[in-house]
Image: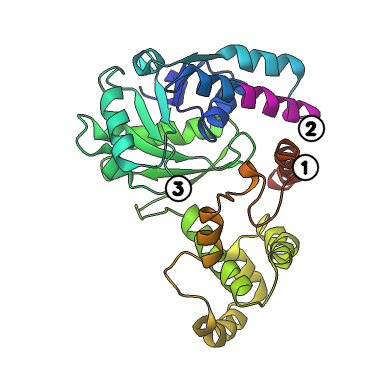
């Protein structure tokens, strides 16, 4: 392949939290999609999620009944990896975050795809170079990391491995833009890439403050929603420091940095919640309680979509 125009169809391996949403995005943007998983029940659940999410998009004015129906009809499901990837120009792997599993999937895919097909991983932090190790053509492997919920969140991380070719990078970057997403590039591989390193640093401090009794989870969320999140939606941390004054930042950092959380352990709150099976929204209880799980997800997505509408006017 020479350009993004050569991508005519795509495959998504995995129909779970990320996979079904990624398939949905490609289908909404006109691409025939083959979505693969290990059994029909998982695929059925994935398609049900897609239909429910499309309804939310319709209700918020992001698509129409007609376009949603077309998107659903563009998605084929299969339990055969070969059927999913054979003849596809672009494949996105979205299986469990396990290096051995991902390498096994990529190794098998390489037997079925054409020589110039691009193989992308949705890994949230595993090295692309390690995923591609042992493949005949590691230059066609790249990371395209979508975020939850992938059918709404605009940003997508593009991660090059050590052997990723310029052509692979250019086509993947252009494809992410073509499907209406906002690509940002990880120039040098590092565990966690950009997104999860930044997110974990903030979460570590948030949980530290709650553990120390400085604030409640509710007030930490309010602080982020009403101040940091509000600013960062239009002005990132570097421009924010520019606007506030680098000299001011230097003075604050000098006295505040030594007091910040620097532990390398999982917060006790998280350990206790996992032990009790309180995994968050998907189980009805996590840090907060969710009596109606389906309604909780819908409310979250409605909020995201309202924010996205505003952000699209700002980004123009």
On the rendered image, what quadrant is the N terminus found in? Answer: top left
Q: Is tag 2's residue or tag 3's residue first in the polypeptide sequence? A: 2
* Image coordinates for residue 41, horizontal then vertical, percent: 52, 20
Q: Secondary structure at mark 2?
A: loop
Q: Is tag 1's residue or tag 2's residue first in the polypeptide sequence? A: 2
Q: Residue at x 19, y 35 (%)?
A: 134
* Image coordinates for residue 64, horizontal then vertical, percent: 76, 20
Mark 2 vs mark 3: give the one in front: 2
Q: Are marks 1 and 2 in contact (CB under 8 Å)?
A: yes
Residue at the disc numbered 1: 306
Residue at the disc numbered 3: 185
* Image coordinates for residue 165, horizontal then vertical, percent: 30, 36
Q: Tell me if I can see residue 165 in this picture.
A: no
Judged by its main secondary structure, the magenta piece is helix
Q: Residue at x 59, y 51 (%)?
A: 278
Q: Secondary structure at mark 3?
A: strand
Q: Between residues 297 and 4, which one lies in front from this camera angle? A: 297
Q: Which residues are magenta?
A: 48-61
Q: Secondary structure at mark 1?
A: helix
Is 276 in the magenta?
no
Residue at the disc numbered 2: 60
Residue 208 vertical position relative to residue 174 in the rendered view, above or below: below
């Amino acid at each position: 392949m020479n350009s993004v125009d050569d991508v005519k169809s795509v495959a998504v391996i995995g129909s779970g939290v990320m996979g079904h949403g990624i398939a949905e995005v490609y289908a909404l943007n006109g691409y025939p999609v083959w979505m693969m998983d290990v059994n029909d029940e998982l695929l059925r659940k994935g398609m049900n999620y897609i239909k429910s999410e499309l309804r939310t998009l319709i209700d918020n004015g992001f698509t129409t009944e007609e376009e949603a129906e077309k998107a659903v009809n563009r998605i084929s499901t299969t339990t055969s990896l070969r059927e999913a990837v054979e003849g596809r120009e672009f494949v996105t792997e979205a299986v469990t975050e396990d290096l051995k599993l991902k390498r096994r999937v990529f190794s098998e895919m390489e037997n079925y795809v054409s020589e110039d097909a691009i193989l992308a991983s949705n890994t949230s932090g595993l090295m692309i170079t390690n995923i591609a190790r042992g493949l005949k053509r590691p230059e066609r492997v790249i990371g395209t990391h979508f975020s939850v919920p992938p059918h709404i969140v605009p940003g997508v991380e593009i991660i090059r491995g050590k052997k990723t070719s310029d052509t692979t990078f250019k086509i993947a970057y252009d494809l992410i833009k073509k499907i209406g997403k906002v690509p940002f590039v990880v120039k040098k591989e590092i565990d966690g890439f950009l997104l999860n390193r930044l997110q974990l640093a903030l979460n570590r401090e948030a949980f530290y403050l709650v553990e120390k009794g400085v604030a409640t989870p509710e007030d930490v969320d309010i602080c982020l929603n009403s101040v940091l999140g509000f600013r960062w939606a239009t002005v990132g941390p570097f421009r924010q420091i520019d606007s506030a004054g680098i000299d001011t930042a230097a003075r604050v950092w000098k006295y505040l940095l030594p007091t910040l959380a620097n532990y390398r352990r999982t917060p006790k709150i998280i350990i206790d919640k996992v032990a009790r099976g309180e995994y968050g929204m998907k189980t009805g209880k996590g840090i907060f309680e969710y009596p109606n799980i389906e309604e909780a997800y819908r409310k979250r997505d409605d909020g995201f979509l309202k924010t996205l509408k505003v952000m699209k006017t700002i980004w123009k």
